[in-house]
Image (tube, grey):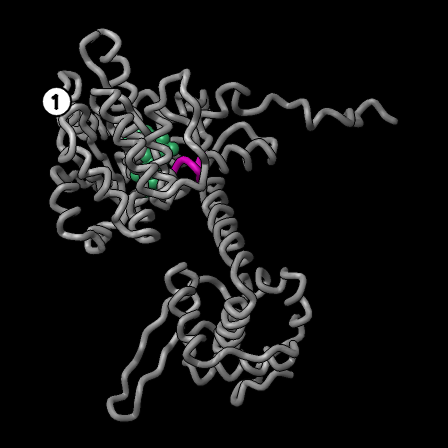
Amino acid sequence: MGSSSKNLFEKFSNDSLIVKGQRQALEPGFIPERLPHREKEAELLAEILSPSLKNYKPSNVIIFGKPGVGKTSVVKFVESEISKAMQSRLDSKIKLIDINCGVVDNPYGVLLAVGDGLLESWEEKLPFTGWPLDKLYNTVLEKVKNFAGITIVVLDEIDKLVKKSGDSVLYQLLRINEVTNEGRVCLLGISNDLRFTEYLDPRVKSRLIEETMVYNPYNASQIYDILRDRSLYAGIADSIDESAMKTCAALAAQEHGDARRAIDMLRIAVELTEKGNSKRIEDNTIYEAKNKLERDVVVETVSTLPLHSKLVLFSISLIDEIKNGGSSNMGEFYDLYERIADRMGISGLTQRRVADIIGELTNLGLIDSKVQSFGRYGRTTTATLNYSSSRMKDIVLSDEVLGQLKDVKPLQKSLPVS
Ligand SMILES: Nc1ncnc2c1ncn2[C@@H]1O[C@H](COP(=O)(O)OP(=O)(O)OP(=O)(O)O)[C@@H](O)[C@H]1O
Ligand SMILES: [Mg+2]
């Protein structure tokens, strides 16, 4: 080979944009030490929780805010500050217990987590399952009393717990303060759904919501600051074009001011830049990252849908395609859906069930739908695809079973399956 030929390993030996150890600063689990534009929120929460350092029960708090606006981050930050403050105050007795209700969404799990959080190191753990709830509750109550301090229970994504299992366990935890003076429990709930309090019993609501904080979405310039700070942590601040950082911030601000999305976009832009063997992150890489992120989310969402939901989505996509982007009504997509199901040898669901599926697809953001009323002539549901029909079709057809539908084409008027 001539001397100009490249070494086989050359493309792998390029210095990457990010030094290995710093890459984690862009990963989802990273907890930054600084939270730009949330200093006031952190301070206010610290103020609310500060009585605990003097062994008084703080007010119960609920923090609301859209996804990615820093709720969990602020709480984690304040928790770590409490732990530090406790070290210099020997008289304070605080236990911080974190529960992610996205994972632990039933009364047993919640009580167990509180009980385990209060375990003295030499004690045996409580049984993972099997005890009657009242026995578990009484054990937790004893532990709260024995601890005789302030037990702060953080219920992240508390709305999921309430939607899944109701508010009975919240009532039990809140009642502890009414049945004993020996130890106190303070609840801190975090939710991105403002409406979840509608599901609460008035007795729970009035006790739980003593303080409320609402975190607003970040605007573009705030997200810009967050991204700049994060890129300093990651050691890539000098490799990003100023305009690329601004674009990234602006795009995330358009979508309910979500810092998580901005950081995800930046991480993917770094990956794309490295793959392209480039050293600088530019505007177009950010757009590419945005597309990839959306694609990933849509693929993930669609691929986990049940079969019939995929078929309904596929029907809407086909009609969208022949109409060149337009909505279809129940008559149209239901008819096509039935034919496709028939062709696959499965029986189609009723219109009523398909209407439910339309609701689910709408909630997932894959389509928009409207119920139109024609007075005494009845009502019909119309659906519009939120993504390009060719992309949506490709995703649905990538399913092993549905791949056989590749050649299905609706005809213009009657939309029969070819
Ligand atoms: N002010 C900030 N400064 C630095 N990073 C931030 C800030 N706010 C949010 N982030 C980052 O954005 C991401 C999302 O933040 P966080 O998890 O706190 O959001 P959240 O409000 O709890 O969202 P969700 O409702 O989805 O749980 C995290 O990676 C976090 O580090
Ligand atoms: Mg959170």
Circle 1: residue type = Tyr
Residue 100 in the image: x percent, y percent?
36, 37
Which residue appears at 26% of the width and 9% of the height? Answer: 87
* In this view, 206 is above or below 16: below
Overall secondary structure of the magenta stretch? helix
Give the magenta-colored segment's residue range.
Answer: 262-266
- Number of residue marks: 1
Image check: 163 left or right of 265? left
Residue 102 in the image: x percent, y percent?
38, 43
Mark yes or no: residue 414 visible.
Answer: yes
Mark yes or no: residue 248 visible.
Answer: no
Which residue appears at 27% of the width and 83% of the height? Answer: 373
Which residue appears at 22% of the width and 24% of the height? Answer: 145
Between 388 and 392, which is closer to the camera in this rendering? 392
Q: Which residue, as the protein is rendered here, is positioned at the far bottom?
A: 376
Residue 262 in the image: x percent, y percent?
38, 38
Quadrant of the image for the C terminus? bottom right
Residue topped by disc 1: 56
Which residue appears at 41% of the width and 16% of the height? Answer: 122
Quadrant position of ligand 1: top left
Image check: 57 left or right of 173? left
Quadrant of the image for the N terminus? top right
* In this view, 252 is above or below 73: below
Question: CB at mark 1 closer than 8 A to ligand 1?
Answer: no
Between 150 and 29, which is closer to the camera in this rendering? 150
Image check: 164 left or right of 2? left
